[in-house]
Image (cartoon, helix red, strand yellow):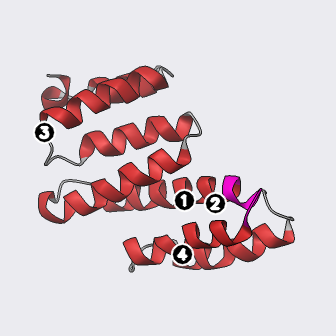
Amino acid sequence: MAGRYGMSFAAKMIQEGKYAEAVEEATRAASRDDEDPTPLVERAGAYAWLERYPDAVKDLEAAIELDKTAGVLEIDVVDDAYFSALLGAAKVAARTSLEAADRLLARYRTVLPDGRHLADAAAWPERLRAAGGGA
């Protein structure tokens, strides 16, 4: 019940650096309420700490979609987290395929067409090329 009265258990685990436990707790919370995007954002945060960027991207995209109905997320925070996760995934992908990295970064404009990081998403493919792949 921590989510109702303050910090969720998943958020507490993240704060304590227990990222795998946070993933588990957020997964349980998401299964209890499939209309609340918050556990997906929390799980994405834990995935990002674990450098599991594709999983973080997937959860954030699902959370953004759910929030179109729920309207409970702080969109600026989610926007930042989403761009960060996409960039992390793109940097990993760029080690083997710059085209895959480009496709990942292009998703930002599709998912958040009014997002705060449109210019960043457009600039990073060139940065990755200049760095020779993974930056």
Question: What's the residue type where badge 3 is placed?
Answer: Asp
Q: Are marks 2 and 1 in contact (CB under 8 Å)?
A: yes
**Spatial separation of the CA atoms under disc 1 and disc 3:** 26 Å
Residue 93 left/right relative to 28:
right
- In the rendered structure, which disc, 4 or 3, sits on the residue that comes first in sequence? 3
Question: What's the residue type where badge 1 is placed?
Answer: Leu
Q: Disc 2 designates what residue?
A: 90
**Spatial separation of the CA atoms under disc 2 and disc 1:** 6 Å
Tell me the quarter of the picture where residue 76 sits.
bottom left
First to last magenta residue range: 92-97
Q: Residue at x 35, y 24 (%)?
A: 24
- In the rendered structure, which disc, 2 or 3, sits on the residue that comes first in sequence? 3
Q: Disc 3 designates what residue?
A: 33
> Do we see residue 39 in this rendering?
yes
- Residue toward you, 67 or 104: 104
- In the rendered structure, which disc, 1 or 3, sits on the residue that comes first in sequence? 3
Residue 57 left/right relative to 37:
right
Q: Disc 1 designates what residue?
A: 86
**Spatial separation of the CA atoms under disc 4 and disc 3:** 30 Å
